[in-house]
Image (spheres, coloured by chain):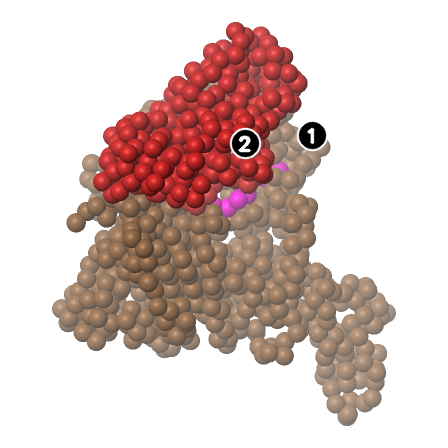
Amino acid sequence: MNDMTNKWIGQRTIRPDGADKVTGRAQYSADFAMPGMIHAKMLRSPHAHARIRGIDTSKAEALPGVKAVVTAKDVVDFPLDKSVMLGIQDMRWMCRNVMAREKALFHGHPVAAVAAINEEVAAAACALIEVDYEVLPHVIEIEDAIKPDAPILHEWNTFEGKPSNIAGTMVLKTGDVEKGFAEADVVIERTFTSRPVHQGYIEPHACTVSYAADGRVTIWSSSQGQFMVRAMTSLLTGVPQSNIRAIPAEIGGGFGAKTIVYLEPIAVLLSKKSGRPVKMVMTREEVQRATGPAPGSLSTVKIGAKKDGSIVAAQGTFYLQAGGLPGSPLRGPVGCSFAAYAIPNVLSVGYDVVSNRSKVAAYRAPGAPLGAFATECVLDEIAEKLGLDPLEMRLKNSAKAGDKAIYGPVFGEVTFKETVESILHHPHYKAPLDKNPAPGVKRGRGVASGFWYNAGGESSVQVNITEDGNVVVTTGHPDVGGSRASIANVVAELLGIDHSRVSVLIGDTMTIGFSNLTGGSRVTFASAMVATASTEKVIGQLKERAGKIWGIDAEAIKWEDGMALPAGDNAGKFPPLSLKELAAKANEMGGPIGTQVQLNTTGADPGFATHCVDVEVDVDLGIVRVLRYTAAQDVGRALHPGYVEGQIQGGVVQGIGWALSEEYLYDKNGRVDNASFLDYRMPVCSDVPMIDPVVIEIPNPKHPQGVRGVGEAPIVPPLAAIANAVHDALGKRFYALPMSPPRVSERLEQP
Amino acid sequence: MTDIRYLAPSTLDEAVRAFAAASGAARILAGGTDLLVQMRAGIAKPGTIIDIKKIPELTAIEDLGGGAYRIGAAVSGAVLAEHPTFGKAWPGVLEAVNLIGSKQVQGRASPGGNLCNGSPAGDSVPAMVAAGAVVTIQGPNGRRELPVEKVPAGPGRTNLAPGEIVVAFTLPQRPKGSGDAYLRMIPRTEMDIAVVGMGVNLTMEGGVVKAARVGLGAVAPTVLLVEDAAKALIGTKLDDTALEAAAAACRAACKPINDKRGTIAYRIKVAGVLLKRTAAIAARRAGGN
């Protein structure tokens, strides 16, 4: 499959969702409407931290036009003493995140919801709800939350025997770090901070929900998993999964944050109470205040190396800012930071720290960029101190096949070196850089690498042959990164037919078998594998049909160029039978042609990336601009190169925002002061150069097309790569993100 | 929910009458790029909206000769950019007006709206102040004129009396050797609001500054005319000492706040940096005239 004679795999075919999106016909979650539909709004906590002593909804319920009011007492409670997990999500926290229960834990935390004849009445009714708050001292920053006298968010949570905001730990260990550091010629230890950043998807969370008189629920919403929507809604409302049909809308970006629900269970409860379909749409301000950012971090990394650059010991301590409820992605920094390197002695520890801000949600390679920021900056400093090229140093320490990864498994293939070498030999890395092109202008170059686990998991794919001999493929995954286009390429290739004859669509929870989330860089890997199995079964059926028609054994038939042919001269001489001809004869020769395959896929090898960036600093204003960016990654096989490049470019741009400009700003009451795209400064197009992706294709031997996950590894290196480039430009290291103009300016005035 | 009256009078008298009659419950709509956002956010809840774009005087650009222009308050940035000669005489004013919002917003946003919105960070205002623009205002008691820097009263507030509407900006004649420029500091490259905005207008003769005006935005409750900075430039050849003195005057004029868009220390520093950079561009343009 993995060769240059492929007709469709590796082609930049027209995306199946493209025409609808550019003509405005695509149905996003806010685009659905139903007869009799009413509108709902959340009442959100005005306080960063407050105990809820009581809620009186009577005035709101009495307002004309109000159809239903919901509070935490309507949501299924998951008591604090018993963990109930759905994937990586603990339902104790989910039930408290969708609706505050004992306490409001952040400004914007939902405390009640109202459904009414329109949004204005719903909002007016929200204002009539009387919440009896006991306002409590709040804490936002990690440094403050872990102080001994910090306000405690969850009194029942203890750490080392005392009430604490540290809600969890993770430790990975190999060898003896003390012994390792003692053997090192150079040891560098640095502490880094970064701010929480929002995933910044353009489409706000929204849903339309119908709870019918017979108890059957239909949910239209965009998410990274309709089966997740079904399961979480079921758990939080008590409606059995078999009664919930979750229909995936087109999604306007998720980047991890749409792997949990915020609105759907509440809308179901409102629809049940009112007997009307309910629509709920967040404003941008609600999205920024109350939906998941990535955590902020406080990390200390210590690395020891020999004079020749070989790393003998590494220690990482990563505090992540979970928000109001536990659940920081500790396995990101703890497991990924040192994974690309063969280091004999490692101790990597993570702490999950709660504080009064919105609960974190997954964001592209959750937590890994924070770990890489610290680790890859310290490596840069060690290379500088030892007078080594930072890429040569990475090559020297690359993990190898057969090494035991710190997070458990033994590596099969390790293709890290190839990414480093591709940057080392890239014209970008060799190009001369004028470091002081004009007075007050400094330029610098930096590199960094990144690691992400990648994932397999459950996928279901149906392949059905239409009566006119074309193909409909149904998968169970929302398409956030081009999975439909990629699957169309794979199925067209296997069947040997024109790409335009394959339609790929995303089924809902009642029309396709269980499929896990679109996340973890897993969907194209898993669904291509399952689509291959499904298509091969269909080809088997087609050969059987041809065998029946010709009166020969199916084994003696081969499938080529969209046709059944006798496999050799011994099989007999028959004119080829095309897919169209076989489809036309389907019913007389045994019935419809099609199948569904469901697998728990395995074999997703990790992703490696190495980046190189040139920056320019306006010294007087402290502005850092990215001039040139090259990102190398082993993708295994690019089923659709345009989408692969887009994933790499998108990850890099999000990393640039993380490094240079994005942060939440709080007022003294713990309220987010910049809950808008104007003042939460994500990069705009003119802020970034065209990102140059270097797509390395070393096929994954465990995948039929050789695919490796792509979507997450590219956001891991940029934070460190840019910090290293700024150091190269200015001769000063930055240990805190974002490197925004006021911060850079302030740092430049320091000695 | 609430009914809003929308009026689009074709004469200024009608507009003034309607505006005065609404006694505070009306808002003037020029491009609407601030008003509609405020209404959507629930900050503005006008009972009446008076659209002034149907009044010919408010959408006209008049070449008065000798570099002088009269620009209707509701002229959009895009229309001003397409004027055949305006941008040659006043490149700084034009670049400032064209920095309001995005390409799409430029089709609607006007210098009159930018001024009356009362934001100290409005991009066109420092350039207009540097240009020495005079604003024509019409109200129930007739017509009056104010230097542009006298119009803002504080964030979101103006010195317009009830019922008064800004009609036009008049930019004075340009002596030979004049040039203006506007620069702003924003963290991004576009789609942002000025952390500091700087307008400089110079007239040069034989390399010596004969006249200067400096407008400084986003560092105080209103856009400032920094006369000390102008004085520091006049009579000099824009040598480093003169530029540093003018920069120091700009820094001294700053009375900024710490807010989400910038810190006090950073804004003060940037004001000085931008003075030097903007003056250099204005001087280059003056030399080219």
- Colour in which chain A is shown? brown
Q: Residues within 10 Å of mark 2 (few under 14, many from 20)?
A: many
Q: Which quarter shows the N terminus of chain A?
A: bottom right
Q: Are marks 2 and 1 in contact (CB under 8 Å)?
A: no
Residue found farthest to the bottom: A570
**Which residue is under mark 1?**
A36
Measuring from the top left, give residue A173's x and y in whole percent: 26, 64
Q: Secondary structure at mark 2?
A: loop
Q: Tag 1: residue type?
A: Gly
- Examine the structure image and report whether residue A382 is included in the region drawn in magenta: no
**Against A473, is B159 above or below?**
above
For disc 2, the chain is B
Does A722 appear above or below A92?
Answer: below
In the picture as drawn, the residue positioned furthest to the left comes out as: A182
Badge number at residue B109: 2
A204 in magenta: yes
Question: Which residue is found at the position 46% from the left and 22% from the top?
Answer: B134
* Left or right, A50 with reference to A186: right
- What colour do you see for chain B? red
Gap in angstroms between the C-alphas marked 2 and 1: 39 Å
> Over which residues does the magenta segment extend?
A198-209
Q: Nearer the viewer, mark 2 or mark 1?
A: 2
Counting from the top left corner in percent of width and height, residue B91 is at 47, 38
- Residue B133, percent from left and from top: 45, 25
